[in-house]
Image: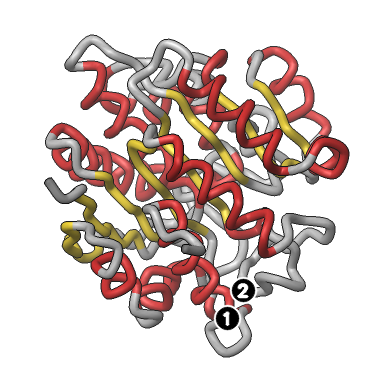
Amino acid sequence: MKRKAAVIGVPLDLGASKQGASGGPAAIRRTGLLESLKSLGLQVHDTGDLPIPKPSGRGSLKLRNGAAILKVCKELEKRVHDLAKEWTVPITLGGDHSLAVGTVAGVARARREEGRSIGLIWVDAHADINTPQTSPSGNVHGMPVAHILGMGDRNFARLGGFSPKVEARNVCLIGTRDVDASEKDNLRRSGVRVFSMQEIDRFGMGTVIEQAIDLASEGTAGFHLSFDIDVADPGTAPGTGTRKRGGLTYREAHLLMEMAADSERLLGLDMVEINPLEDVQNATAEIAMELISSAMGKSIY
């Protein structure tokens, strides 16, 4: 049987300071994503874009646009759950990273209904583990890991009707290099495993992703992989709103995705924070398409 996958667009940029990530799903689609996935022998379809409500004011300064983002995450959780329940791999195109609360909750609920848990591999320059109380900006795209772990805002943390979405022992952060002071405390208390850029430099991406897959898979049905394009070095992927020098190379990013595919444990995939307003000739969206294809089984031979 062909493996099944479905593309979901979430043109959301309410969780970030900069506008523009709302154009990410369209930019990635323009690269021929569906054609690339079909060429791998996948049974794949595009479910379209989720509607994004207009926020009524900025809301709380500690949780900017929180009500509108929560509404998007609730709808996304339902769509992802229905796909994951049928063992279809949901591929979510963002949009800012706040959407991942919905995707992880949807995949986790589908497996929870079978009495199983999931792991999470979070690939990002940032830890995204602020809470409304610790965030210096109130931007929700800096909080999803906290909410997934059951910290922070109760409405986000309880999305899908349970918390945490993933046990900390099965959560791995990869490529981290820009962490707020308050996030460091949250990371220490959480117990998640962090593979910073320093560890990637010392031990190599092959060793790091191998360990991350083992941790995310231990006692679980598999893992969700949430990939923020800002984990890549800006020289490789300039089209994002939160650039930070010293990130993954093109080949390191592909090796990560290729090994995730080889594990045959991938349950869901996010590709987020592509911002066409910051991009050069859609180059970052092209890289995003290539990375998604690698995660879904494209190989060198």
Nearer to the camera, 266 or 190:
266
Tell me residue 66's x, y (percent): 44, 43
Q: Is residue 43 left or right of residue 56?
A: left
Q: Disc 1 designates what residue?
A: 283
Q: How is the image coloured?
A: secondary structure
Q: Is residue 142 left or right of residue 292?
A: right
Nearer to the camera, 50 or 226:
226
Q: Nearer the viewer, mark 2 or mark 1?
A: 1
Residue shown at 79% from the left, 44% from the top: 177
Residue shown at 77% from the left, 37% from the top: 196
Three-letter amino acid code of the residue under disc 2: Gly
Q: Disc 2 designates what residue?
A: 239
Tell me residue 258's x, y (percent): 51, 50
Earlier-in-chain disc, 2 versus 1: 2
Callouts 2 and 1 close, C-beta under 8 Å: yes
Three-letter amino acid code of the residue under disc 1: Ala
Nearer to the camera, 287 or 234:
287
Tell me residue 191's x, y (percent): 66, 14
Q: CA distance from mark 2 to mark 1?
A: 8 Å
Residue shown at 68% from the left, 54% from the top: 252
Secondary structure state at the residue bearing disc 2: loop
Residue shown at 83% from the left, 57% from the top: 246
